[in-house]
Image: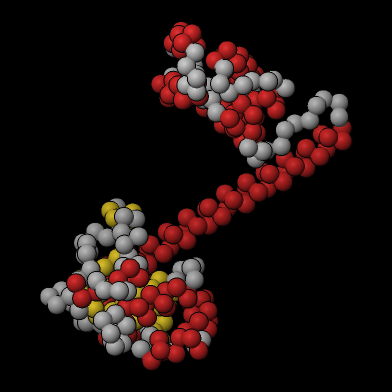
């Protein structure tokens, strides 16, 4: 591989270096180091070198330096040279502060504070990612409850187009559901309707029976707007059964949004609040013994 690099160097093909080095890295990640502007910048900042991006001899010198650096810090890095190159990239992008020169106590103290701040930001970001993951899982679970309940009651079910491929109960959330909306719903508001979390429809006619917006942690406002788009699709407002499904502790938030003057037309459509607790407690009994939409209306609350 190094011989191939030296062969390319001899040909003096301008601009080929970074692309070729990155290609070689994917073939031999334990031998070849990736090469781009940020990596070079980070390496130069860390070591005081003056590597230039377009020079193969500079690249090979940097590679040797990174291999030695990687060996010294092997317990923190990886046999895959992409790890040490990633560190150089982050340094080059100034995502992490560089360590100060030895003997400079003031700089060392400032660097320690900067490093602590970076670690705190990283931890907060990871916590937010985990929170989002848990939120997504809770939202998907409730969609799954509504999907299974709708199918058990004999309805066709539509799952929001952006959620259909989500994993659920060993399969996909949209398993057993409609793959396209009926023609009657493919109108000007179709883009918004496709994003409604769950819709129940009559199997033969394709008529909408009920629509559910699950407001786990997301904005209640957007869900209300989508339900209104559905109700107004095809002209005059239609009397679908519309539900905002949310955790029990969000009832006050849901009511506050629905009672806004801007949503007076939504209230006229008899939109209901369906608490998680009621759905969790009664969904199995409704699936076994219920008929039509009335059992769901019975556990929902009017505004």
Using the rendered image of the protein, determine whether residue 247 is visible from the camera's viewpoint. no
Q: Position of residue 91 (x, y in %)?
A: 65, 33
Q: Does 292 appear above or below 194?
A: below
In the rendered structure, the answer to whether residue 71 lies left or right of residue 139 reads right
**Front-most of 155 and 226?**
226
Q: Position of residue 49 (x, y in %)?
A: 69, 20
Q: How many marks?
A: 0
Using the rendered image of the protein, determine whether residue 126 is visible from the camera's viewpoint. yes
**Front-most of 60 and 280?**
60
In the rendered structure, the answer to whether residue 132 lies left or right of residue 171 reads right
User: Residue at position x 80%, y 26% from top?
Assistant: 101
User: Residue at position x 38%, y 62% from top?
Assistant: 140
Q: Position of residue 109 (x, y in %)?
A: 83, 38
Q: Position of residue 74 (x, y in %)?
A: 60, 22
Q: Which quarter of the rendered picture does the N terminus lie within?
A: top left
Q: Does 200 appear above or below 69?
A: below
In the rendered structure, the answer to whether residue 115 lies left or right of residue 211 reads right
Quadrant assignment, res 201 = bottom left
User: Residue at position x 41%, y 64% from top?
Assistant: 139
Q: How is the image coloured?
A: secondary structure
User: Residue at position x 72%, y 40% from top?
Assistant: 115
**Front-most of 49 and 199?**
49
**Farthest residue toward the bottom?**
268
Q: Which quarter of the rendered picture does the C terminus lie within?
A: bottom left
């Amino acid at each position: 591989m190094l011989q191939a690099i030296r062969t390319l160097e001899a040909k003096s093909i301008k601009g080929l270096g970074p692309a070729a080095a990155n290609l070689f890295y994917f073939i031999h990640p334990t031998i070849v180091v990736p090469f781009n502007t940020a990596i070079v910048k980070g390496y130069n900042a860390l070591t005081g070198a003056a590597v230039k991006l377009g020079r193969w001899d500079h690249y090979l010198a940097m590679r040797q330096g990174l291999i030695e650096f990687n060996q010294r810090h092997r317990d923190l890095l990886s046999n895959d040279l992409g790890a040490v190159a990633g560190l150089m990239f982050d340094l080059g992008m100034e995502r992490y502060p560089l360590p100060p020169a030895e003997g400079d106590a003031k700089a060392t103290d400032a660097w320690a504070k900067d490093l602590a701040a970076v670690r705190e930001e990283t931890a907060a970001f990871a916590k937010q990612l985990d929170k989002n993951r848990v939120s997504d899982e809770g939202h998907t679970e409730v969609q799954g409850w509504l999907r299974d309940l709708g199918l058990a009651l004999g309805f066709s079910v539509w799952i929001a187009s952006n959620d259909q491929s989500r994993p659920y109960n060993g399969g996909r959330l949209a398993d057993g559901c409609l793959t396209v909306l009926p023609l009657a719903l493919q109108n000007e508001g179709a883009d918004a309707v496709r994003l409604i979390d769950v819709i129940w429809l009559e199997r033969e006619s394709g008529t909408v029976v009920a629509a559910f917006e699950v407001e786990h942690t997301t904005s209640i406002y957007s869900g209300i707007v989508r339900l209104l788009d559905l109700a107004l699709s095809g002209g005059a407002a239609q009397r679908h059964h519309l539900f905002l499904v949310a955790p029990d502790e969000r009832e006050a938030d849901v009511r506050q949004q629905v009672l806004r003057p801007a949503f007076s037309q939504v209230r006229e459509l008899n939109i209901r609040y369906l608490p998680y607790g009621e759905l969790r407690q009664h969904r199995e009994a409704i699936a076994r013994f219920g008929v039509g939409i009335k059992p769901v209306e019975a556990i929902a609350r009017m505004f």
